Image (tube, rainbow, N blue to C red):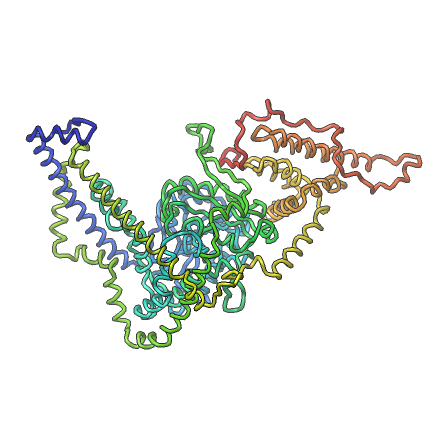
């Protein structure tokens, strides 16, 4: 019965039709298995309903998979919120290093409960703990504090980060903060107002420029007439917005998964899939609430207004929320498989705020972006493969990210070309490459479209009009009619909640199904993988998925065409204040204002004044940047060697912030005028002893040749640097020599030739045949975790 007759399904059916007895036996085998799987499937779904009910009864419902202790409650703040800060307790056999910077993981409050950032061992929290960092988590309660606003949450998150910094005064850097999805833009808003509190910021799957890309959800505001529907939903909830509506919007994006694939996957693999399904459903069904003022602010100012990425938001005390004020490195992690926050929405704020690379440098901002090819939105936070790869590499290389110079950089994580050593705990299977990118590369991903902006600007104006009409003529009646008890009944009748409520132990048939499932597990008869009926089942499932995917694609195309047609009409645009002959951009561009240009000119003038300022530490950093600029890379070994060179110059107590400032400042100068900055190196070494100059020159050669074979251009630059240090050595020797009793002593000593002397002796530089045993790598930055620990 279990024998595989042929590899061709068609041939198998042809043979079975000529063998009725065998066909009947296989049909019976499949029927028994299908019936048993149906009972087991129903029992897992029963457990899902029970789990939902138990989750609702918890005082602080979450799916965090790590032991923790409460550090700070947002309920006790001057402006209370339903957020809280907890410390993740590390395993007893792997304590956190108090010298390492702490990590703070902030979960999104976008319909689901907290805990997704620490949902499993291979997660953002797990990666930080594995790397030895102290770790904290910011979660929230299901119900908001009446009257709390988005600004109140911002202030609370800033207070949490400040508290973490106070708890770790001796750490080598400010707290690194991870913001997932909605928490990503909220953390960036807080960092723009209180930039002094934050270390590196990682935003994962965070939508920041809502008009960018081609995601179907962005058309919803225009096709429903704006945010009046949000206000109506908040009024029906008696001042609370049910997060289940947000979750339903997510589910509508992928009907194949919502209506079929998720359930079929459980049914087809019910013997093993139950625990994983229940674990995920505990998170997916943990719906939370927002205040109506919170969701209205989000929809009006971010989803429809798109005001965050153009610096139009202002706090209640008059502070403008400008993302260009952030002084911490920003790492943007997004995926091309994400249909909620595709890369254009995650990266569009860069092209909205900055006109060119000089703008980024003028604001001394470091932006790193990393993209995934296929993972979905939730996979960015919860996927085990992403936790073991991307988030682990982010945590291991966070100090390198913190000292990256201003500008835009692209991070890529690949399989390590060197074989992994079995049993070696320092061995790493991944290799992180960081290369310099540009605003033009980001623009190719975002694809800004002025005509598209005009359409969305029209939507924003129409939304304001419709919302004003609703608030004037409808909202007073709705608020008078809706009671708290009525709102509770409406919540229970939500379609997503009904699926959990209807099938649990409360159902009269639940006990019978549970008993039948126990019997099935004791007498399980799984079907053979070669059974043609099982193969037919899989083919049917594939056909259903394809049909639903085609429906989705057609629906999204209709949405897009309807949106573009309606809001491209000259009459519609004219009604919203846009003229056919108006060449002005439909929304403000902060980088094009006269005030911004004046600020940029002043910053560049200040930079030019620092070209001839500094000492040995500045000279070393300039030399390394000059040589490695030809490669466009600096791996972890370069970073550690550079730190060893500079550490003595920063005093007995190494200050990571001082080191970061030093590296970033010199990198800015190099981008401004590389030739002048390099030529000034001998002048920076005027007060340095000759022996120390020679020692440092030899160490520079070691640092540059520590990983890869030098190219011809790198070799030439290294020789030029060696000549500059040799020149400084001669000047130092001449300055320390006794004065000669001749008229030559009257020659002014301040006149120094700062041009490289290529004819002078130089320290021996690495040659191609002996420079390194490591194969030459692509011209990108490499960081390898663990090898130099």
Q: Residue furthest top?
A: 769
Whole-percent x and y of residue 565? 38, 59
Q: Is residue 353 visible?
A: yes
Give residue 16's quadrant in the image. Answer: top left
Q: Is residue 656 left or right of residue 16?
A: right
Identify which residue, 414 or 40, lies in the foreground.
414
Residue 130 x/y as whole percent: 43, 41
Residue drawn at (28%, 56%), measured in percent from left and top? 55
Quadrant of the rendered image containing residue 275? top left
Work out whether 96 lies above or below 286: above
Residue nearest the viewer, comparing 90 with 428: 428
**Percent position (x, y) of residue 354?**
55, 53
Q: Is residue 500 left or right of residue 293?
A: left
Q: Quadrant of the N terminus?
A: top left
- Residue 194 in the image: state x and y as whole percent: 53, 59
At a point 20% along the width and 48% down the height, the residue shown is 44
Q: Does residue 86 appear anywhere in the picture?
A: no
**As drawn, 590 above or below 525:** below
Of the pair 757 and 127, the residue shown nearer to us? 757
Judged from this view, the residue extending furthest toward the left is 21
Could you tell me which residue is drawn at 60 percent across and 36 percent down?
641
- Residue 107 against residue 432 in the figure, above or below: below
């Amino acid at each position: 019965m279990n024998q595989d007759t042929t590899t061709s399904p068609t041939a198998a059916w042809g043979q079975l039709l000529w063998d009725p007895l065998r066909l009947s036996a296989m049909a019976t085998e499949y029927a028994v298995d299908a019936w048993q799987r149906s009972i087991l499937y129903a029992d897992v779904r029963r457990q899902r309903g029970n789990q939902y009910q138990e989750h609702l009864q918890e005082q602080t419902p979450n799916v965090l998979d790590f032991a923790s202790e409460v550090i700070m409650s947002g309920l006790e703040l001057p402006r209370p919120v339903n957020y809280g800060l907890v410390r993740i307790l590390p395993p007893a056999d792997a304590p956190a290093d108090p010298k390492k910077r702490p990590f703070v993981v902030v979960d999104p409050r976008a319909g689901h409960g907290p805990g997704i950032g620490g949902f499993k061992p291979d997660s953002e929290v797990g990666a930080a703990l594995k790397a030895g960092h102290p770790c904290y988590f910011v979660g929230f309660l299901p119900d908001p504090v009446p009257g709390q606003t988005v600004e109140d949450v911002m202030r609370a998150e800033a207070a949490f980060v400040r508290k973490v910094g106070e708890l770790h005064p001796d750490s080598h850097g400010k707290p690194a903060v991870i913001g997932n999805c909605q928490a990503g833009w909220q953390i960036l808003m807080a960092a723009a107002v209180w930039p002094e509190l934050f270390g590196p910021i990682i935003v994962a799957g965070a939508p920041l420029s809502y008009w960018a890309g081609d995601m179907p959800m962005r058309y919803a505001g225009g096709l429903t007439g704006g945010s009046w529907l949000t206000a109506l939903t908040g009024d029906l909830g008696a001042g609370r917005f049910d997060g289940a509506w947000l979750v339903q919007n997510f589910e509508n994006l992928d009907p194949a998964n919502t209506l079929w694939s998720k359930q079929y996957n459980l049914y087809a693999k019910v013997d093993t899939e139950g625990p994983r399904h229940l674990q995920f459903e505990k998170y997916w069904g943990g719906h939370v609430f927002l205040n109506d003022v919170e969701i209205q602010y989000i929809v009006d100012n971010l989803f429809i207004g798109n005001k965050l990425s153009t610096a139009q938001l202002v706090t209640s005390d008059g502070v403008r929320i400008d993302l260009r004020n952030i002084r911490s490195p920003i790492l943007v992690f997004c995926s091309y498989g994400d249909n909620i926050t595709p890369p254009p929405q995650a990266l569009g704020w860069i092209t909205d705020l900055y006109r060119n690379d000089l703008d980024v440098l003028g604001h001394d901002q470091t932006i790193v972006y990393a993209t995934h090819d296929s993972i979905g939105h939730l996979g960015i936070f919860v996927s085990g493969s992403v936790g073991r790869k991307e988030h682990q590499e982010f945590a291991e290389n966070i100090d390198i990210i913190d000292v990256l110079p201003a500008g835009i950089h692209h991070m890529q994580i690949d399989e390590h070309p060197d074989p992994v050593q079995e049993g070696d705990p320092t061995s790493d299977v991944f290799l992180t490459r960081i290369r310099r990118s540009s605003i033009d590369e980001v623009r190719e991903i975002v694809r800004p479209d002025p005509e598209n902006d005009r359409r969305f600007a029209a939507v924003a104006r129409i939304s304001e009009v419709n919302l004003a009409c609703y608030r004037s003529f409808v909202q007073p009646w709705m608020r008078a009619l809706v009671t708290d008890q009525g709102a509770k009944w409406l919540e229970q009748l939500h379609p997503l909640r009904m699926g959990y409520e209807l099938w649990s132990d409360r159902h009269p048939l639940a006990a019978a199904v549970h008993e039948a499932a126990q019997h099935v597990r004791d007498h399980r008869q799984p079907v053979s993988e070669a059974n043609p009926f099982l193969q037919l089942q899989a083919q049917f499932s594939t056909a259903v998925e394809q049909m639903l995917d085609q429906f989705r694609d057609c629906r999204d195309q209709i949405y897009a065409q309807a949106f573009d047609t309606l809001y491209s009409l000259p009459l519609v645009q004219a009604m919203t204040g846009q003229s056919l002959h108006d060449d002005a951009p439909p929304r403000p561009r902060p980088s094009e204002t006269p005030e911004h240009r004046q600020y940029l000119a002043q910053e560049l003038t200040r930079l030019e004044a620092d070209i001839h300022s500094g000492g040995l530490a500045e000279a070393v950093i300039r030399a390394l940047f000059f040589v490695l600029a030809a490669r466009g890379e600096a791996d972890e070994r370069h970073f550690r060697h550079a730190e060893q060179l500079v550490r003595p110059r920063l005093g007995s107590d190494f200050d990571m912030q001082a080191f970061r400032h030093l590296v970033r400042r010199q990198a800015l100068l190099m981008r401004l005028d590389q030739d002048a900055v390099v030529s000034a190196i001998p002048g920076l070494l005027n007060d340095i002893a000759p022996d120390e100059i020679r020692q440092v020159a030899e160490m520079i050669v070691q640092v540059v040749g520590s990983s890869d074979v030098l190219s011809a251009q790198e070799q030439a630059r290294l020789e030029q640097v060696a000549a500059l240090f040799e020149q400084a050595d001669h000047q130092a020797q001449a300055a320390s020599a006794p004065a000669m009793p001749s008229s030559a002593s009257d020659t002014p000593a301040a006149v120094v030739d700062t041009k490289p002397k290529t004819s002078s002796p130089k320290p021996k530089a690495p040659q191609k045949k002996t420079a390194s045993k490591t194969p030459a790598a692509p011209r990108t930055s490499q960081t390898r975790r663990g090898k130099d620990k």
